[in-house]
Image (cartoon, rainbow, N blue to C red):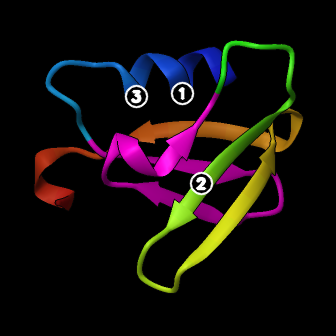
Amino acid sequence: MKARIRELLHAIPFRPFIIHMADGREYRVDYPEFVLASSSNQSVVIVEDPENERIHTLFALLIASVEEVIAADL
């Protein structure tokens, strides 16, 4: 799943997407600058939430799915 997130982060043009966690939490990514999903063996994805100034550490094994946001949802 981490590879898919990296793919979406580097897409041109970038399109927002939502990371769905196994426990039901969701993290919307509107800008690639707010996410770190390195290609190393690290098993985490870091998401910054600029609205409430929080940083979330997501364990890659707990990411259930990644959904691209379609234009109507923007």
User: Residue 31 got which mark?
Assistant: none
The percent coordinates of residue 3 (x first, y second) are 62, 15
Residue 35 falls within the magenta-colored stretch = yes
Q: Report the residue at 57% width, 47% height from top.
A: 19
Is residue 39 rendered to the left or right of residue 66?
right
- Quote the CA–CA distance across marks 1 and 2: 11 Å
- The residue sitting at 54% across, 37% down in the picture is 66
Which numbered dot is residue 47? 2
Res 48 quadrant in image = bottom right
Amino acid found under the numbered disc labelled 1: Ile
**10 Å crowding of disc 1: few (<14), some (14-19), many (20+):** many
**Residue 1 seen from this side:** no
Ranked by sequence position, the earlier of labels 1 and 2 is 1
Q: Are marks 3 and 1 in contact (CB under 8 Å)?
A: yes
Q: Is residue 15 above or below residue 51?
A: above
Circle 2 sits in a helix, a strand or a loop, which is it?
strand
Residue hosting label 3: 9
Q: Amino acid at mark 3?
A: Leu
Q: Nearer the viewer, residue 12 or 70?
A: 12
Label 2: how many Cα within 10 Å (few below 14, some 14–19, many 20+): many
**Residues in magenta, as a range:** 16-37
Query: Residue 5 got which mark?
Result: 1
Above or below 58: residue 60: above
Is residue 18 rendered to the left or right of residue 62?
left
| Percent position of residue 33, x then y | 38, 45
The quadrant of the image that shows the C terminus is bottom left
Q: Mark 3 to mark 1: distance in Å?
A: 6 Å
Q: Secondary structure at mark 3?
A: helix
Question: Is 39 above or below relative to 33?
Answer: above
Q: Secondary structure at mark 1?
A: helix
**Residue 42 appears at what percent x and percent y?**
85, 25
